[in-house]
Amino acid sequence: MHVPGIIIGGGIAGLTAAVALQQRGIAVKVCESAPEILPLGAGIWMAPNAMQVFQRLGLAEKINAAGVPLHNIQIVDGQMRPILRTSQERIRQRFGHTTTAIKRARLQALLLAEIAPADVLLAKTCVSLREVPQGVNVAFADGTTITAGFVIAADGIHSAVRAQLFPSVRFAGTGHVVWRGMTEIQLAPVYKRSITEAWAGGVRFGFSEVADGLVDWFVVVKATPADADHHGLKSRLHTIFQGFAYPIPAILEATDETRIIRNEIADFDPIPQWSRGRVCLIGDAAHASTPYMGQGGCQAVEDAYAIAQCLHHEPTPELAFAAMQRLRRPKATSIVKKSRLMGQIGYWTGAAGALRNGLMRAAPARLVEQQFYQVYRLNY
């Protein structure tokens, strides 16, 4: 199938879709609203399901070389005592990959390098779409229009395309914000090549290396009006985590306060339909989830590959988008629901928190890994 298309959004979902489509000989252009693609953002974890997709696209080795393939994932308490720990070795044996931690900007650059510069259009903010006999007419804020055979909307949780197609989406806020940072610090060997997340006192602190001596970290706390202000942020975070053991205080101390990023944590109730006519949503535009399973970017990568596969095999975009939703919606919806649950469990304190920790410590490693297998398995 050789139908020229447009992808709205130049993030990981949109760029992965462009690579997958072009590898199948399907012409497509990426329309990004920013005037330039800058090396912004912190780190991202590409779990084995995403890495299997990148293997099929011929990019897994480059991504592993640019990031840090991890050996284990662990949840600990505030004193760094293990609550739950999973080795990635058995997962690597089963799926061919572990989770790779990488700078988001580095991953984006690797994907961009696979796409001809002429196929990435910048400063293109989509304002409306209209179906026409030739396909879809897309109007942009700069006054230009482009007509394409299909449109893939990869424009994130606040998708302008979704707002036009499905305006009744209900956002579900969590009352928490996430602060993210990148810190130059050498961790003790026990914390290298590991994702570590500390749960205690109703707050969470997670971290991993994304390169030797470069640590990506995040903090999840209840939202307050002052949380939008960086002034005194490090002092506030030090106060919140003053009772936590090494390396959390050291990571915070070494961080440049001005480079910390703030995001509100939210998702939205699963929507029954991802497409209308020749327009289809992918990634956070279709099924945004909270970050508690580390699967937001990974599910977007899965969408990108699946939609390219369906457009390649089906005779029309409408049939392709319907096939893609059949393939992907059950798993993506499950991730949204499980991530919400993980968010609630992680904030338990007192007797409930102690019970949670005890049950998680007693859980057999094989049983825990089976839960990961369901997430990492691909069905296409």
Image: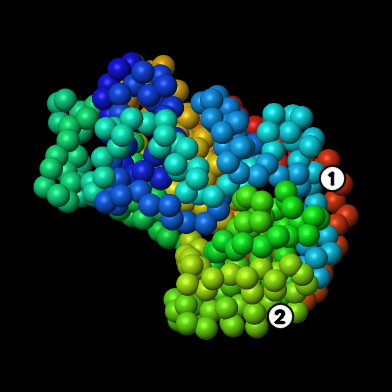
Residue type at mark 1 is Ala
Q: Nearer the viewer, residue 8 or 269?
A: 8
Left or right of 80 in this view: 376: left
Left or right of 24 in this view: 149: left
Q: Residues within 10 Å of mark 2 (few under 14, many from 20)?
A: few
Q: Which residue is mark 2?
A: 242
Q: Quadrant of residue 12?
A: top left
Determine the secondary structure under disc 2.
loop
Determine the secondary structure under disc 1.
helix
Residue type at mark 2 is Gln
Residue 118 coordinates in the image, percent (x, y): 27, 32
Residue 355 coordinates in the image, percent (x, y): 82, 66
Label 2 close to label 1 by CB (< 8 Å): no
Answer whether residue 164 is visible to the viewer in this image. no
Residue 59 coordinates in the image, percent (x, y): 54, 30
The structure residue drawn at horizontal position 26% and vertical position 25%, both measured from the top left corner, is: 4
Q: Nearer the viewer, residue 359 or 86?
A: 86
Cα distance in 3D space between marks 2 and 1: 31 Å
The structure residue drawn at horizontal position 57% and vertical position 37%, both measured from the top left corner, is: 63
Q: Quadrant of residue 80?
A: bottom right
Residue furthest out toward the left: 143
Q: Residues within 10 Å of mark 1 (few under 14, many from 20)?
A: some
The structure residue drawn at horizontal position 85% and vertical position 57%, both measured from the top left corner, is: 361
Up the image or down, 25 lies above or below 176; here it is above
Residue 168 coordinates in the image, percent (x, y): 33, 55
Answer whether residue 146 is visible to the viewer in this image. yes
- Give the foreground label among 2 and 1: 2
Q: Nearer the viewer, residue 154 or 258?
A: 258
Q: Which residue is mark 1?
A: 365
